Image (spheres, grey):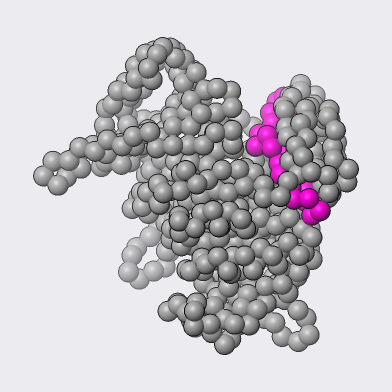
Amino acid sequence: MQSLLSPVVQIARRKPHDAGAPVINGANVFAMTPGRIAHHFLAVRGARPLSFSLSGSLPEGIFFDTGKGCFSGKTFECGSFPLLITVRNAEGEAKREFTLIVREGFLGAAPLMGWTSWNAYEWRIDQEKILANARLLCSLGLASRGYSYINTDSCWQGNRAGSRPGLHPNSRFPDMAAMVKEIHSLGLKAGIYSTPMVIAWGSTHQEIFAGSTGYPLDPEYFHAYFGGCGRASYEEADAALWASWGFDYLKYDWPMCDIPHTRKMREALDKTGRDVVLSVVTQCKAELAEEYRKYAQSYRCNPDTRDRWEFIEANIYTADPWLDKIGPGGWFDLDMFALGVMTIDRGRKDISMPEDRNCLTRDEAITHFSVWAILNSPLQLSCQLDKMDEFTLDLVSNEEIIAVNQDITALPELLREENVTEDGRILRKIRIYRKKVSDGGMVYCFVNFADEEAKMFFAPGKCVAVRDLWSQRDLGSTEKVEMLLPAHGARVLKFS
C-alpha cells in the first residue's frame, strides 16, 4: 500500500468543467412537495453542448427539458419515481440512476450547496455583486459540481412604505425579480434572508434593516440585540412578495430560534404555492430537532464562521448532539464556509486581518471542508469568487468529497475520539468520523485537533482496498493503515 506518512495532504487538481466526456455530479435524488412549483437542474461537468434524456415515468405536471437538464412544474401525484438519466456530448456519455420524490416533508432531501453573501461582503452587497458571483459560480465550474444556490444574506432590505405589501428592497437592489430571473437562467436557484426580529442583523446606526415582524415588541421574545421580535406580523406579505420574485430558499435568522416563529414562516411560505427551502439559524436547540424538522430543512446553533482555527474547531463540536437527528429533508448546518477572500472581520480595530487572503492554514482549510462534507452539512461558499485562488478552487471542487456529502443513503457517526494530554497540554486529540456510502464502501475522516502533527494506526478489521479521496488515488489493499495527520489537519479515506 502507498504511504500516507507524508506531512503534506495531497489535493487533486480539478478537471476542466467544460471539457471531456460528461460527469454527473450532485445528489441522485430531488424532492418536491405535492401541489407546489419547483425546479431542479442537473449538475454536469463536460464539454458543451450537452444533451439529456431520461427513461422512466414522470408524475403528471412535471416536465424535463432535454436541452437544459432541468425538471420543472408541479404535481399532485405523490410517490417515488425512479429514473435513468443519460447525458451525452461529443466526447461520450454518462448514465446515472435518479429518483424524483413527491412527498410531504421531504423537501431538501440532500444538503444544500451554493454560495451566500455574508462572509464575502457583509453589508456591502448590491444586485450586481450577487449576479457577478452567480455568473462566476458557473464560469469557475462550481455549478457543474453541484453548487446551485445563490443566496443574498442580510442588508438587502428596504421599507414597507406606501400600499405595497411585503418588505421591499433598498436602492442597491433595483429589480429583485430581474435578478432572480437571471439567476434562474444560469441554471441556479435564488435565496433570500429575513428574521422575525423587528431589526435584522447587519443593521448599523447609519442604516437599519427590517425583519418580518414590527413594533410593538413582544415581551415573550425580547432580546437585548435590537429588541427581539414584534407583535405585528408581516410573514405572509413578505413570503408572498419573495415568491412573486421567484426565490427558492429563505435563511431565517434570530437568536431564539423558537418553534412558533418557525412554524409561522413555514406556513406563510407554503401559502405562496412555491417550494421554498427554509433554513433556521443561529441558536437552534437539539432537543427541539423533531419540531424543527416539521417546518425547516436545516438548522444551526453556532456563530458566523471566521477564518480562524478556533472558530472551525468550535463549530465542529456543535454537531455532536445533532448527528442522530439529521436525515433527508432535515440537516444540521455547520454554517457557511470561511474559505477564500472575505470581508468579515476586516477593518476591525481590535484585530488585524489581511484583506487579500484567508487566514486558515492549508491543513485547516482541508479539515474545514472535510468535516462539513462528511457530516452532511449544507455546503455554502461565502467568499469573493473573483479572488478565489487555485488551491481553494481545487479544494471545493473535489467531486469525490462532494459526493460523500450528497450521498444520503446512510448517516455519519462519530466513531471515536482519542485524547492524550500532559501537564494540561494537548499532545494528541484525534477524532474519527465514519459514513457508509451508496456503493457499499465506508468513508472515514481522521481529524487532528492538536497543534502538532500526529502519527496514527487504523485497522479496519479486514483487508480492504483504500482510496484517498483528497488526492483521488487508489492506495492498494491492507489490514492496517498507518498515516501522519498534520496539525489541525485531516485525511479522508474510503475503504471498500
* Residue at image location 59% in from the left, 82% down from the top: 231
Front residue of 152/351: it is: 152
* Quarter assignment of residue 414: top left
> Residue 121: x, y in percent?
54, 63
On screen, 4 above or below 252?
above
Query: Picture coordinates of residue 315 (x, y %)?
Result: 40, 52
The image quadrant that residue 296 belongs to is: bottom right
Q: Nearer the viewer, residue 413 or 123?
A: 413
Query: How many callouts does the rendering have?
Result: 0
Look at the image and tell me whether residue 187 can be seen: no
Left or right of 488 in this view: 26: right
Q: Is residue 153 above or below residue 38?
A: below
Q: Residue 82: where, in percent of width, then height?
A: 76, 31
Residue drawn where x is 53% and y is 45% of the image: 326
* Magenta highlight range: 20-48
The spot of residue 207 in percent (x, y) is 56, 80
| Quadrant where the N terminus is found in the figure | top left
Task: Identify the residue at horizontal 55%, vertical 38% (top origin).
Answer: 405
